[in-house]
Image (cartoon, helix red, strand yellow):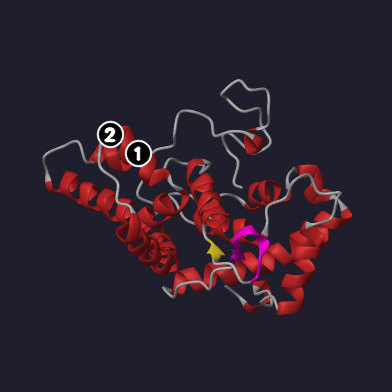
Amino acid sequence: MSATNTLLPLSEADLDRLEILLDDPSLPEPMRLDEIQGYLCAALSGPQAVPEEERLAEILGSEEAVASEVGREASDLLRRFTQELEAVLASGEPPTLLLYARDGEEAAPNDFSPWCEAYLFAVDASPEDWFEALESEAEGNDPAAETAQDELDYLDERLFPMMLLTGEAETAAREHGEEWPSGEELEKMERECEENLPYAASEIYRFWLAKRGTGTQRREVPKVGRNDPCPCGSGKKFKQCCGAVE
């Protein structure tokens, strides 16, 4: 990237300003900072990164919000935030996670769930399915199929922290009749996942960066945006129903 395209990293004052803008009542249910970071880590990954205009609309709530006065200022800060985050992910270093305390109390433990839910939302909303092409390649009996299966296993392992910290892993296990840990065993798993989360996000980004250009198949079913009607038929927006990140 040339120097003319390099934006300055955000200072603490810039982050504070972005938080203020995100709280502006003119924005229709924007993401919080923790959700933004989780969303972007996945939106920048995958077979194809989510285009900037789509990312901004998802984060700020609508295309109209992006075009507003508040949205334009927020978008400028978000572009800088995104560029800095992507540089960290590309370097192989784990990003410093932006997290809020549970229940909004400073003394409470950090709440990883919104960050992880936003990440998984971006995985599901990716322009190209993360798994479809690899699953198709893994169906054979040749070395290419073995490689594809290894890559699927690699992704599953690194997505596990997001799955566990949102409760998705427990739900899936119980649906398949599998036992789920509790007590100290579960607490240990949660601590390990919290520690591994930023490393997993970086490793997933670099995995897809290396994979791009290999012809990952486009998913046939159109993706659902946060502001589209929820496909479950509730009549609510997707972000207020099955796609809620809070």
* Residue at point 73%, 66% (across, down): 77
For the residue labelled by badge 2, is the local secondary structure a helix, a strand or a loop? loop
User: Is residue 105 inside the magenta stretch?
Assistant: yes
Residue lying furthest top in this view? 233
Q: How many neighbours does mark 2 have within 10 angstroms: few (below 14), some (14-19), or many (20 or more)? A: few
Q: Is residue 143 above or below residue 161?
A: above
Q: Which residues are magenta?
A: 99-106
Is residue 217 visible to the viewer in this orientation of the structure?
yes
Q: Amino acid at mark 2?
A: His
Q: Is residue 135 above or below residue 49?
A: above
Residue 35 location in percent, x, y?
61, 56
* Residue at point 74%, 46% (across, down): 29
Check if mark 2's residue and mark 1's residue have beta carbons within 8 Å.
yes
Q: Which mark is residue 172?
A: 1
Q: Amino acid at mark 1?
A: Ala
Residue lying furthest front in this view? 183
Q: Residue beneath label 2, please?
A: 176
Q: How many neighbours does mark 1 have within 10 angstroms: few (below 14), some (14-19), or many (20 or more)? A: some
Q: Is residue 198 above or below residue 118?
A: below
Residue 168 location in percent, x, y?
42, 44
Question: Along the horizontal axis of the image, is 205 left or right of 30?
Answer: left
